[in-house]
Amino acid sequence: MVPKIETTRHAIAIAIEQLDKWFGTFHVLRGVDLTVKRGEKIVICGPSGSGKSTLIRCINRLEAFERGRIIVDGIELTDDVKRVDEIRREVGMVFQQFNLFPHLTVLENCTLAPIWVRQMPRREAEEVARHYLERVRIPEQAGKYPGQLSGGQQQRVAIARALCMNPRIMLFDEPTSALDPEMVKEVLDTMVQLALDGMTMVVVSHEMGFAREVADRVVFMDVGQIVEAAPPREFFDAPRHDRAKAFLAQVL
Ligand code: ADP
Ligand code: MG
């Protein structure tokens, strides 16, 4: 049976309160507050080094943090490994470098975690995987190895692989930054489709066309802080902060 995209159980999908994080003595996140509602699409942008990756990596505990709270679909993130596992079940993540297993086929990449982490029977896992490969429009690549695919196709496999775990929230960290320009659109189209399906999404991206089309809110970060958060029209047409204006002048 192929699962439907499930929405978060709580009206607030992610609540980040007064988050502080240090790398040694370097204060990388400074009092970050961010609330993501069920079904909401957030695009995070900002200069390189501003803490965007670190922030979204904190959400599924790929990074620890020193101060503040993160609550994902009603579950508070603590050091408790069981809680971390519970949250990782809810949250799928797609990285800039697709991170596929090179020695496994596309289908095996997609079924590995459902079979070994979720104890899903292989046949069912394969059915689910084929469903999502169809959704990202590469069902015919199922038997190939990642190295035989283009970058855009590999990134679509990475998205399908994340969806096979049936997450309620998807995090994307610059998913198109490593792609040749002609492949960016096919990946963004997949993400637009996912947004239309009602997925809660937090996307670090400088694809401003995508942000305009899909985002409910654009969040601008600089030196570890959220400087501005506004609906795309407001953010692009009338940014309030000088740092946001300077950033937009560079990327638009
Ligand atoms: P962004 O994604 O906005 O480019 P990052 O979150 O990757 O920014 O990084 C924010 C800052 O933290 C940068 O100055 C980066 O060099 C530093 N940083 C990131 N990861 C580590 C780490 N593991 N150890 C030390 N410093 C790090
Ligand atoms: Mg980054």
Image: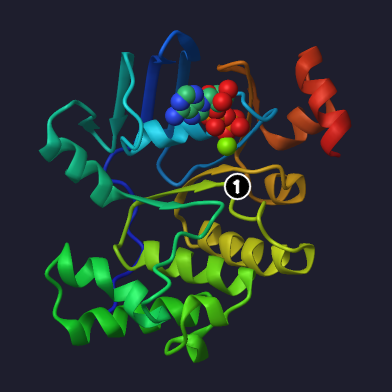
Q: Which residue is mark 1?
A: 174
> Is residue 82 placed above or below 55 in the rendered structure?
below
Looking at the rendered structure, the kind of residue marked 1 is Glu
| Image coords of residue 152 (percent x, y) | 63, 69
Residue at (24% x, 42% y) in the render: 87
Secondary structure, mark 1, is loop
Quarter of the rendering occupied by the C terminus? top right
> Is residue 117 placed above or below 49 in the rendered structure?
below
**Where does ligand 2 appear, by image quarter?**
top right
Query: Does any atom of ligand 2 lie closer than 8 Å to the CB of label 1?
Result: yes
Residue at (84% x, 22% y) in the render: 246
The image quadrant that residue 221 belongs to is: top right
User: Is residue 226 rendered to the left or right of residue 101?
Assistant: right
Using the rendered image of the protein, determine whether residue 87 is visible from the camera's viewpoint: yes
Q: Nearer the viewer, residue 83 or 8?
A: 83
Q: Nearer the viewer, residue 244 or 48?
A: 48
| Image coords of residue 51 (percent x, y) | 55, 25
